[in-house]
Image: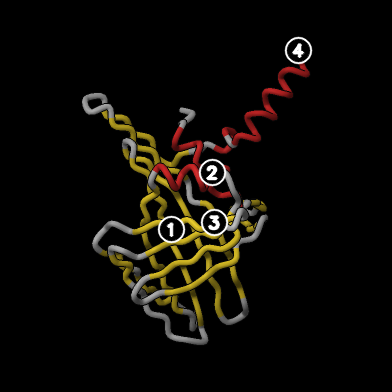
Amino acid sequence: MRFLTVVIFLIFSTLGYSQCEYSQIKFDKSTRLLFLKQYPVTLDIFETPFNGRIILASMMRIGDNFTIDLEITTDSNAQELEPVCFKKGSKLTFSLTNNETVTLEQREEIICGIKQDVKDTDYNTVSNYARFVIDLEMINKLKEHEIVLMKVESEDYNKTFVLKSELEEVKNDEIVTSNPTRYFIDNLECLTHPKI
């Protein structure tokens, strides 16, 4: 019996079901519309004594529509940072381990970033936001292969990021490990086949 329990646990862990945690769950009984939002996951961290960057991603499901939200926060005391606006048609492209690329588009008209000056320091901080649609064809590709590169393109922003297979960060005095290259493999199933 113990062996069977361990095997079931390993199967579910491999499928990523153990990671299905949602920051919001709503279900409208009259329309039968399901709304799910996952907690943000860190995809990238870059730090020097003069500047830093963190990229957070969270996915949402509204009915049968899926999106990924990106928050790219940069701070610097060496240069003046300005927020950018991601407009309709901005692109998020992932290069996968099977040499395919998957491109997602923003369909919202405009989403603009915000700027903050950190009091008592010389740092200024900019958080830029974008939301990209994941259609069903892209879901099937993204959940099969790991990500190698992530490219974000808009009129005012064009950057490529190399994602790590494992990333450690400190949250609430604890070390939290994420696997950026497996982001979709580990999390898409939680939206397409929710465990709630």
**Mark 2–mark 4 distance (CA, rounded to whole Å):** 32 Å
Q: Which mark is residue 143?
A: 2
**Mark 1–mark 4 distance (CA, rounded to whole Å):** 46 Å
Q: Are marks 2 and 4 in contact (CB under 8 Å)?
A: no
Front disc: 1 or 4: 1
Q: Which of marks 3 and 2 is nearer the N terminus?
A: 3
Residue indicated by mark 1: 103
Q: Which amino acid does label 2 sit on?
A: Lys
Dividing the picture into quadrants, the one containing residue 97 is bottom right
Front disc: 3 or 2: 3
Asked which secondary structure carries label 1, the reply is strand
Asked which secondary structure carries label 4, the reply is loop
Q: Which amino acid does label 1 sit on?
A: Thr
Q: Do the residues labelled 3 and 2 touch (CB within 8 Å)?
A: no
**Mark 3–mark 2 distance (CA, rounded to whole Å):** 13 Å
The crowding category of the residue bearing disc 2, from other C-alpha atoms within 10 Å (few below 14, some 14 to 19, many at least 20), is some
Q: Can residue 22 be seen in this view?
A: yes
Q: As rendered, which of 46 and 158 lies closer to the eye?
A: 158
Q: How far from the left and from the top, in percent, is residue 76?
A: 50, 80
Q: Earlier in the sequence, mark 4 or mark 3?
A: 4
Q: Residue 100 carries which label?
A: 3
